[in-house]
Each structure stands twice: as C-alpha cells, then as structure tokens.
Amino acid sequence: MPVRDFTADDLEGVLALTRAEGWPSYAADPARALRALTAPGIATVVAEDDGIVIGFATAGSDGEIQAYLINIAVAQTHRGKGIGKALIVALFARTDAGRMDLVSTEGADAFYRSFPHRTLPGFRIFDADPRKIHH
Ligand SMILES: CC(C)(COP(=O)(O)OP(=O)(O)OC[C@H]1O[C@@H](n2cnc3c(N)ncnc32)[C@H](O)[C@@H]1OP(=O)(O)O)[C@@H](O)C(=O)NCCC(=O)NCCS
C-alpha cells in the first residue's frame, strides 16, 4: 500500500477517517484542519488504496532530535496489514528525528508496543479548562 506525502486533495479522505474515529477537531473546521496538517514543522503522510485515502498520520518535529506523533488512523477495513507501521516509518524518515513521543488511547497500545519503545508517564495540558473550549 503506497505511503506518500499529504496534499490538499487528500483532505476529504483524512476528514472521513477522523469522523469514523469520532474525533471532532479536524472535521469541525476543514480549512483549519488543512492548515494544521500542512503547518511548518509538520509532516503528514497518507496511505492510499485504489485512489482512496485509507490511512493518515501527522507529526511535528524539531527536525533534529524530537518528534511528536499528533494523530494516526487507518480505516477499519484495512487494519492489521502493516499500514500503520508504514505510516510511522514514513514519519520517522520525514521528520529526521530518532524518537517520537505520543499520547495514546488504550486501544492502540498493542500497536505502539510493536515498535522499539519506552513507556513514560505523560500529561496532556491545556491553556484553559478543556470542558469550556473546543480542541
Ligand atoms: C492503531 C492503528 C493506527 C494501527 O494501524 P494498523 O495498520 O492496523 O497497524 P499495523 O497493521 O501496521 O500493525 C503494526 C503492528 O502492531 C500490531 N497491532 C496493531 N493493532 C493491534 C491490535 N489491535 N492488537 C494487537 N496488535 C496490534 C500488529 O500486530 C503489528 O505487529 P507486528 O509488526 O509485530 O506484526 C489502527 O488500529 C487505528 O487506526 N486505530 C484507530 C485509531 C487509533 O486508535 N489511533 C491512535 C490514536 S492514539
């Protein structure tokens, strides 16, 4: 399954994947999502099957040492075929970082454990009460 750089033409496909996961932030404002996926320092890659976007991953990086995985999703119909792994490998290549940190939901633990890794305690902090703002 080819993995390549995201382009604006992939936006609808990526939004469909985020909607399927019940993630509101991207689909709520597609123009904002496009800016987020293509911002300076951000690498976004997609996997395609027959012209359909069936996976995407996006990471931020300092370009030297440290990357942060922002999001990854593979269509339910295409899971367990190595696509998620290929997306992460592509992000490592594009971010030029040797390590990638992330916050994870429990459902994806087995996926992240399949990579060389350390587990560390983590936090997600907000600039305001998260119940009062839309992230
Ligand atoms: C997590 C996700 C991206 C994995 O994508 P995928 O294409 O199915 O993963 P891969 O097929 O590349 O799997 C890579 C490895 O992880 C393992 N793995 C992936 N999902 C697994 C699961 N649910 N249970 C056990 N192992 C799993 C695979 O066995 C494989 O191991 P191997 O390399 O030793 O063979 C995909 O399940 C997904 O989109 N989930 C919903 C969205 C989500 O949770 N995103 C992460 C938010 S933190």
Image (tube, rainbow, N blue to C red):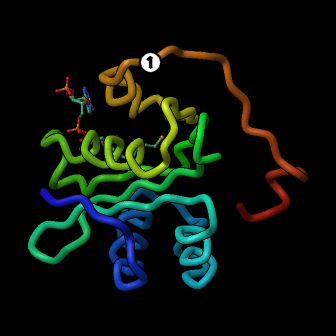
Can you say whether 60 is above or below 4 in the image? above
> Splitting the image into four quadrants, where does ligand 1 fall?
top left
Name the residue at 33% across, 30% down.
Answer: 111
Residue 80 placement: quadrant = top left
Residue 118: image x %, image y %? 50, 14
Name the residue at 48% across, 43% down.
Answer: 96
Horizontally, residue 102 falls left or right of residue 55, namely: right
Can you say whether 6 is above or below 94 in the image? below
Amino acid type for the residue under numbered disc 1:
His
Horizontally, residue 41 falls left or right of residue 12, namely: right
Q: Nearer the viewer, residue 64 or 48?
A: 64
Task: Give the residue at mark 1.
Answer: 117
Residue 89: image x %, image y %? 32, 41
Name the residue at 19% across, 74% down.
Answer: 52
Can you say whether 22 is above or below 6 in the image? above
Look at the image and tell me in which quarter the C terminus lies. bottom right
Can you say whether 16 is above or below 126 in the image? below
Q: Secondary structure at mark 1?
A: loop
Look at the image and tell me in which quarter the N terminus lies. bottom left
Name the residue at 74% across, 64% down.
Answer: 134
Residue 38: image x %, image y %? 54, 71
Q: Residues within 10 Å of mark 1 (few under 14, many from 20)?
A: few
Residue 16: image x %, image y %? 36, 72
Horizontally, residue 18 falls left or right of residue 99, namely: left
